[in-house]
């Protein structure tokens, strides 16, 4: 494995531990905090879209949304484009919570990069953006991933 792949694996593992600690301290599950983050970045979404984004079943996301709604972090509202569905949106309290999460995260990343030349940080950000884009494209190429994993069909 290349050194960059190893370091990215380390960042992913550290990020997972960070998310687990954050969720636990907030009294939430990791999928629930992930839902909040997606709503912040993507705006209101249907429960089905959130289930796909988080990687859980629609039944699981319904239970998570119930807990988030009870806690005052999200609200379900009528979908103006489809009367048969609802959209889930952050409440002001939910937005404030996610903003606090990101403020702490930004500060922690800043502390981790404090001694790095700003020009190098800009280049690292550019490279990470390219890696992220490629990995996202690969994630949507199930036939190609299945082939490369030696599987007969995508699962």
Image (spheres, grey):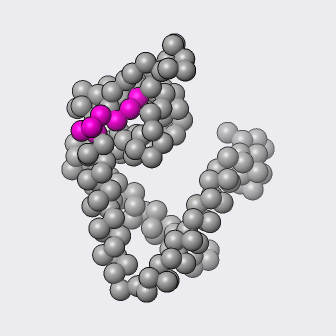
Find the magenta span and give its range. 88-94
Q: Position of residue 23 (x, y in %)?
A: 29, 48
Q: Position of residue 13 (x, y in %)?
A: 43, 63
- Residue 93 part of the magenta-drawn span: yes
Image vertical order of residue 43 relative to residue 102, above or below: above
Q: Nearer the viewer, residue 72 or 22?
A: 72
Location of the C terminus (image quadrant): top right
Q: Which residue is depicted at the point 50% across and 20% down?
A: 80
Residue that protrudes farthest toward the top in the picture: 84
Location of the N terminus (image quadrant): bottom right
Residue that protrudes farthest toward the front in the picture: 80
Q: Which residue is depicted at the point 24% across and 38% down?
A: 93
Give the tally of numbered discs: 0
Q: Position of residue 20 (x, y in %)?
A: 32, 52
Tell me if residue 86 can be seen.
yes
- Residue 124 part of the magenta-drawn span: no
Image vertical order of residue 73 relative to residue 2, above or below: above
Q: Which residue is depicted at the point 62% across and 59% down?
A: 133
Image vertical order of residue 51 relative to residue 12, above or below: above
Q: Which residue is depicted at the point 26% across and 46% down?
A: 97
Q: Nearer the viewer, residue 152 or 88?
A: 88
Tell me if residue 31 can be seen.
no
Horizontally, residue 38 falls left or right of residue 82, namely left
Horizontally, residue 76 falls left or right of residue 47, namely left
Q: Position of residue 125 (x, y in %)?
A: 52, 71
Write down the quadrant of residue 72 in the picture.
top left
Image vertical order of residue 133 relative to residue 111, above or below: above
Q: Nearer the viewer, residue 103 or 135?
A: 103
Write down the quadrant of residue 148 in the picture.
bottom right
């Amino acid at each position: 494995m290349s050194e960059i792949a190893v370091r990215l694996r380390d960042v992913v593992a550290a990020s997972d531990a960070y998310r687990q600690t954050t969720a636990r301290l907030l009294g939430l599950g990791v999928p629930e905090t992930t839902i909040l983050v997606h709503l912040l970045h993507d705006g209101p979404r249907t429960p089905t879209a959130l289930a796909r984004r988080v990687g859980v079943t629609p039944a699981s996301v319904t239970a998570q949304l119930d807990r988030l709604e009870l806690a005052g972090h999200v609200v379900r509202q009528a979908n103006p484009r489809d009367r048969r569905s609802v959209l889930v949106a952050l409440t002001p309290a939910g937005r404030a919570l996610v903003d606090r999460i990101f403020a702490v995260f930004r500060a922690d990343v800043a502390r981790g990069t404090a001694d790095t030349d700003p020009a190098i940080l800009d280049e690292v950000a550019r490279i990470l953006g390219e890696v992220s884009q490629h990995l996202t494209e690969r994630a949507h190429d199930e036939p190609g991933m299945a082939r490369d994993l030696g599987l007969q069909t995508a699962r």
